Image (spheres, helix red, strand yellow):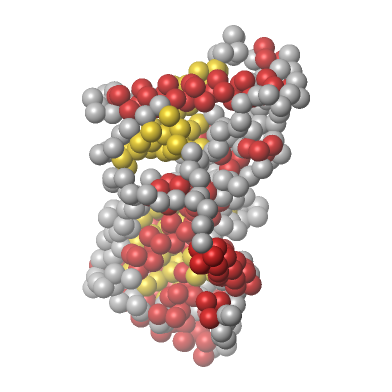
Amino acid sequence: MAEGSLERVAAQAGCTPAANRFLDRPPEEAAGPCRHKDKSPRHRSGDCAIAAKGPDRHDLSLPKHVRNCANRGGRDWWLWSWRHAAPELKIRRPYTCGSWRCDGACARHNSHTLFARLRSAVSDVRHHETGWCFLVLTIDRNGYYSGKPWPDAQTAYRALSTMTGKFLKRLRRACVKRGWADPRNQWAMVIESHMSGWPHANLMLYSPELAAELRTETFTRTQAGAVGREQIILGTEATPDRGDPNGVRAWIGGHAIATDWGLESTADAARSTEALAGYLVKMASDPDANVGELAKLTQVPKSAPFRFRRLRSGKGFLPPVKKNEDFTGALVKRVEDWQTGYTYAMVPEPKGGHSLERRPAVALAVRLEDRVLEQDEERRWYERRRSKRGPPAIPLLTRWQGEQMITETRPEPTTWEGVRAEALDILRRDRKRRMRSCGCGSSSGQSLGETG
């Protein structure tokens, strides 16, 4: 295996930015919160690890995989990864969920991944830049137009799948009836939440004919004196105050009411590539928060029920999430018997069991995790007694050759040229980091390598 830094090797193994955000935490925060349940004898006796500052991992309002995320202080789930061609060399790192429900790095990574997939689908050569339509569908919670008020937001979340299917089916049928091309699977939808907790949907649909009709109606409304949201809001034949009762937004509004959506919804068309980017990109003061309008983090539906799919799209429209096919791995969990307080490592058994090629590597990962667990328990035993004779803490990101942990040390420069080159490299990286943080461009002037 080629030599390289540990971070680069971890990136090749699939370590996302969400997994690298906590690598520089102080040792006292890396210990994580108490791993014992309330019924555990060790927890009731107070003989448990020192809890770190952070959110409560035992919040039952979150799914189990989110509660055990390392970005929330979880230290019970660990990922062991290795190459197919070299299973003896393993990488151990904490488990990160990558879910949009998890605040911080995981939600940002999920949002950036969603934006990359949407941008890849939009930039397909088969799609013209002016053929995209954007609809914001809201819930008629009080039943003002449909006559059927919703009992609560959770009921609306569970009905979104049926409502979306019916609305798209009606919209496609109407497009074909008018002689337009059938949008088929060329659509994507992201569910968001208002401050009140009620959901709404951002729908992106490719239909050049529909986009042209929307532009014409928007121009007509503008000439009539409509401004702002009045130019793109939906209407029906029974609401002539919202534009032409025979216009395109009128029959879209009729289909929206028939499928339990509300008339506070809007429909607009992209005018150019810049307008399309303006819909997709949501600029913010933080450079790391430049994510798509369909993938923004400000209205994440955290109150949605478990197993809720925030992203929905036509079959085959979005490209799959990229991953490194050269690596495989196993999720090793630390499980505690609450009756005895004994903690051990195990790997969940998949359907059909592990393949014959993976079984030796998985068994070795479980044995190594048991060894790390014993060392962590011994170190905590010394910490509770404020003794300095305990074993050192094992880093969060480590490499293992067989059953031995590999410790990497950076070679010291032996010549003045080496010292100067290393110092210049540090200065360059520090200057780039400061420029990125302030949003400045490339500074002019003499380079660091040309200084005397």
Looking at the picture, does residue 317 appear above or below residue 277?
Answer: above
Residue farthest to the bottom? 223
Q: Quadrant of the N terminus?
A: top left
What x and y, as percent, mark residue 303? Answer: 59, 44
Looking at the picture, does residue 71 appear above or below residue 439?
Answer: above
Out of 107 and 263, give the one closest to the viewer: 107
Out of 302 and 406, give the one closest to the viewer: 406
The quadrant where residue 119 appears: bottom left
The quadrant where residue 375 appears: top right
The quadrant where residue 170 appears: bottom left
In the figure, is residue 94 to the left or right of 167? right
**Residue plotted at (65% across, 24% down):** 390
What x and y, as percent, mark residue 439? Answer: 60, 74
What x and y, as percent, mark residue 443? Answer: 57, 82
**Residue plotted at (33% across, 58% down):** 318
What x and y, as percent, mark residue 393? Answer: 60, 32
Looking at the picture, does residue 115 appear above or below residue 89?
Answer: below
**Residue plotted at (40% across, 82% down):** 272
